[in-house]
Amino acid sequence: MFDSDIPGMKAQKISTFAFCFFLYMNIHACRAVWAYVSGIIIEENAVDQFNSQFLGYINFSFLISLGIAYMIFGKIGDRMNVKHFILSGTILLFVLFLLMALLLQFTTVNRFVFLILMALAGVASSTSWPGLLAIINNWFRIEKKVILLGYFSCCSNTGNISGFLYSGFFIEYLGYAYLTPIYCCAAMLFISITCFIIFIKPKPDVCELEDTKEIKITEERGTEKLSFLKAWTMPGVMIYAFSFGCIKAVQTVLGFWLPAYLDSLQISNVALINIMLDLGTMFGAITVCYSGYYLNKRSTLIVPFLWIGTILMVFINF
């Protein structure tokens, strides 16, 4: 996947993949830490009238602002330097996440401040995933891209795992204050942003042979801009978007709600339970990508996996 006939290109591809992976991993770690810590905020009554119902409103504000920002800023990202596009949101996200920790530690603020901050965090988070995928696409124009993307998609699960590890280690095992993993996660996000600024280029300086042919074809035919509404008319887009929306709904419920719910039940090893879920997701993503590539079948593999997941969730519920 990283091989190249151009001297030095292999090392650049590896570093690009690694630092993009590292950045989004730490973005997701922030979400995992918030999901864990929010349950403790409710339990300790750290913020006045901050209960489980209001936590639902906060998480909803984050997700609705994230979805709307995806739709709006995707068009902007196509018209500017993709590295600047990613950093504009990621740096703001770091500031907001650190600000929430400082407010919790040094002030007594109204609960609606956190709702506003999380809504802004949703907007800030919207630049990272589409921007990073654009960079990966610029650097990796290979036949086995589906397998590469299978590995890259694990960055969100790796981030969840690292976030829950921070939380579980500092709070459950060392007994530190619940703000400790927030500061730790903010520090890791700052480091990943710094590495991204220093080492990442939006696209390679030298095009490989297959890229050159593709660029010449694009120049001859011209580039047709695809509008948001027109994209929905393309074959398969609507049904796959709806299916993926349902999958993300389940993942979001488990990611944001499950830690707080388990904490309310006084269940031990909350972090470990959530880590097991993400490890299974990583294994499934890589397995499906490899199988889909070599068997040249995707829907016939994905649907049985979804059936099994549905049965397991119903079984666990009862």
Image (spheres, grey):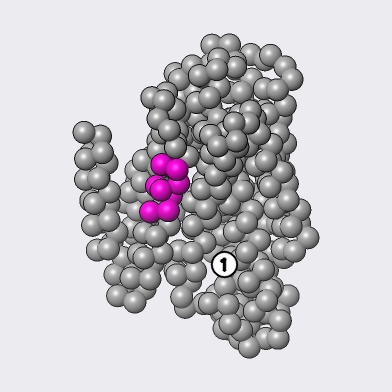
Q: From the top left corner, tell me how far across and down residue 137 is, in percent.
A: 57, 67
Highlighted range, magenta? 272-280
Principal secondary structure, stretch drawn in magenta: helix
**Drawn side of residue 294 relative to residue 73, left or right:** left
Q: Is residue 191 above or below residue 136?
A: above
Please tell me which residue is depicted at 70% across the width and 22% down the height of the picture: 105
The answer to which of 191 and 63 lies nearer the viewer is 191
Q: Which quadrant would residue 114 be assigned to in this image?
A: top right
Q: Amino acid at mark 1?
A: Asn
**Drawn side of residue 227 relative to residue 235, left or right:** right
Residue neighbourhood size for the residue with mark 1, other residues' Cα within 10 Å, grouped as few (<14), some (14–19), many (≥20) = some
Quarter occupied by the C terminus: top left
Q: Which residue lies under the disc numbered 1?
A: 137
- The count of marks equals 1
Q: From the top left corner, tell me how far across and down residue 192 is, in percent.
A: 70, 53
Q: Is residue 203 above or below residue 174?
A: below
Q: Is residue 181 above or below residue 211?
A: above
Find out whether residue 279 is within the magenta segment. Answer: yes
Please tell me which residue is depicted at 76% across the width and 53% down the height of the picture: 194
**Drawn side of residue 16 relative to residue 45, left or right:** right
Q: From the top left corner, tell me how far across and down residue 255 is, in percent.
A: 45, 39
Please tell me which residue is depicted at 71% across the width and 63% down the height of the picture: 200
In this view of the protein, can residue 65 be seen by the observer?
A: no
In this view of the protein, can residue 211 be seen by the observer?
A: yes
**Drawn side of residue 185 relative to residue 40, left or right:** right
